[in-house]
Amino acid sequence: MQNYLPEELKKFKSISNMYDVYFVDLWGVIHNGINLFENAITVLDELKKQQKNVVLISNAPRSSDTVKQFLKKLKFDLELIDLLVTSGDVTKNYINKNQKKIFYHLGPVKDNDLFEGINNISSDINETQEIICTGLVDEIGGNISDYENLFKSWILKEKTFVCANPDEVVSRGNNIEFCAGALAKYYKKLGGAVLYFGKPYEEIYNFAKLNIEKKIGLIIEKKRILAIGDNLKTDIHGAQNFNIDSLLILNGIYKDFFRDNNLNFDKLLKSNEMESLRINKFQQELNW
C-alpha cells in the first residue's frame, strides 16, 4: 500500500506559463547516452518558441565545452539552450582556487581533458592532498568493492576525496552503470572525508542562476524556476535544497522500477533512503 502520490503531469505545455527558467538534467531526460529523446527535444523547441530560458545542468565530470561536443555527436541543437553548466566546471573552479594543493585524478582517461591548463595535478598519490574522482577505472574494476583496499590506504593517509559527479548510477541505453558518486559514498562509508561538487549541492545551482541572470540581464525569482530530472538523490533533492519546484522524469534510471505502470513512490523514496523528499510533479517522459 502507498500513501504518497505526487501530481502526474500529462502534458508539459500545461505548466509552461508558470516558469521562466528551466534547469534541465541531461542524461536520462534529454538522452540515454546513445540517443536523444525526441519528445524531450520537442519540449525544448517549444520552450524556445515561448522565449523561455533553458539551462542544462549536468553532473558530468567534464567541462561544459566537452559535453557540448558530445551533444553535437548526438545531433543535439545547441541553439535550443541558453546555458550549459557541469559539475566538472564547478570542480575545475575549485581546483583553480586551490593552487597550493596538489590533486590526484581517479577516473577514466577520457576525463583527462577536465585538467587541461591545470598544473597542480600529480600522478604520485604520495605528494597529493586530495583525490579528484570522475568515475571508475577499468584497471581497478567495475564493482565498488574492488576499491576497498585502495580506499583504506588513502584514508589512512588522510586523503580527501573530491567527487566531481555525485550521481551514483547512470542509465546508458538499457544498462545501469556506476558513477563517481557511488565511489564517494563507499569512501565515506569506510571513514574517509568526502567533498562533493554538482547536484544536489547548492553551489552548482547558484552558479547556474548567477550565470543565466548575467546573460539575460534580469534577476530571476526562484518560484519562476523549474528543475527537471530523473534522479531523486541529485535532481529532485537538489531542487528541494535550492527551494525550487521539481519535475521527476520516470524513463531514466527508474524506468525498470516503474515497469507495468506500478507507481509506488513510497517504495521508491524508501529504496533511495529519501523518505523526507517531496516530488512536486512527475511525468513518464518529458513530453510537450
Image (spheres, helix red, strand yellow):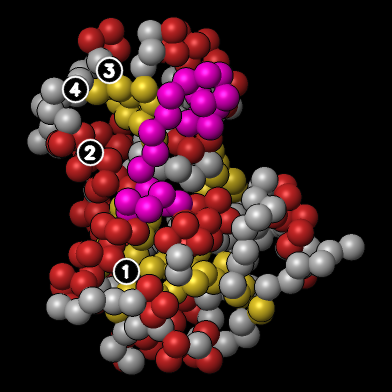
Secondary element under disc 2, as helix, strand or loop, is helix
Looking at the rendered image, the quarter that the N terminus falls into is bottom right
Q: Amino acid at mark 1?
A: Val
Task: Decide if residue 267 is in sight here.
Answer: yes
Mark 3 vs 4: CB contact within 8 A: yes
**Residue 144 or residue 246, whichever sits in front:** 246
Looking at marks 2 and 1 on the same chain, the residue that comes earlier in the sequence is marked by 1
User: Marks 3 and 2: in contact by CB < 8 Å?
Assistant: no
For disc 3, the neighbor class at 10 Å (few under 14, some 14 to 19, many from 20) is some
**Vertical relation: 120 (above or below) 31:** above
The mark found on residue 101 in the picture is 4
Question: Residue drawn at (23%, 70%), measured in percent from left and top?
Answer: 212
Q: Which mark is residue 156?
A: none
- Against 153, is 31 above or below? below
Residue 80 in view, yes or no: no
CB-based contact (under 8 Å), mark 2 and mark 1: no
Position of residue 167 in the picture relative to residue 127 (left or right) = right
- Please give the residue where the numbered disc 1 appears in the rendered image: 55
